[in-house]
Amino acid sequence: QVHLVESGGGSVQPGSSLKLSCAASGDNFERMAWYRQTPGKLREFVARELTSNGRKDYADFAKGRFTISRDNAKNMVYLRMDSLKPEDTGVYFCYVVRLDQVYWGQGTQVTVSS
């Protein structure tokens, strides 16, 4: 069983930055990623990093503003978010794949408002 704990969310003004963290129990994750659920929308992909080749992929809205990174020694995955917009408001979820099993964190709230 894998447990994921996100942190780093909060309430910020437009244009601000936040760095989300996700601590994962266990290791050997094939993929670590972030998703989000914004008000009135289904959960959507934000960013992911593949373990096999270090490839990083981003949703269009995240390109140029968000950066995913990992610390494999600590089993951590991060999401640095810059130039935050009100439409980035939502709950951000950590997502990992280990031995073809998918695990989700409980989410951390991000609110962007003036």
Image (cartoon, helix red, strand yellow):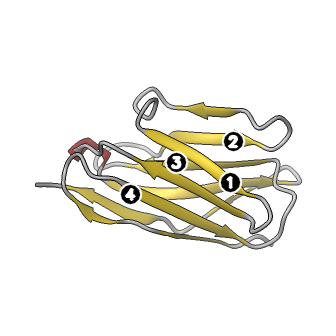
Residue identified by numbered label 3: 35
Question: Where does label 4 land, which residue?
Answer: 18
The quadrant of the image that shows the N terminus is bottom right
At 40% from the left and 31% from the top, the residue drawn is 61
Q: Are marks 1 and 4 in contact (CB under 8 Å)?
A: no
Up/down of 82 relative to 72, above or below: above
Mark toward the viewer: 2 or 3: 2
Is residue 73 shown left or right of residue 8? Answer: right
Q: Residue at x 45, y 58 (%)?
A: 19
Residue found 57% across the figure and 56% down from its top = 78
Q: CA distance from mark 3 to mark 4?
A: 15 Å
How many C-alpha atoms fall within 10 Å of the one at disc 3: few (<14), some, or many (≥20)? Answer: some
- Identified by mark 2, the residue type is Glu
Q: Earlier in the sequence, mark 4 or mark 2?
A: 4
Residue type (three-letter) at the residue carrying disc 1? Arg
Is 84 on the left-hand or right-hand side of 55? left
| Secondary element at image label 4 | strand
Three-letter code for the amino acid on which mark 4 is drawn: Leu
Kindly check if marks 3 and 1 are in contact, taking CB atoms under 8 A apart as contact: no
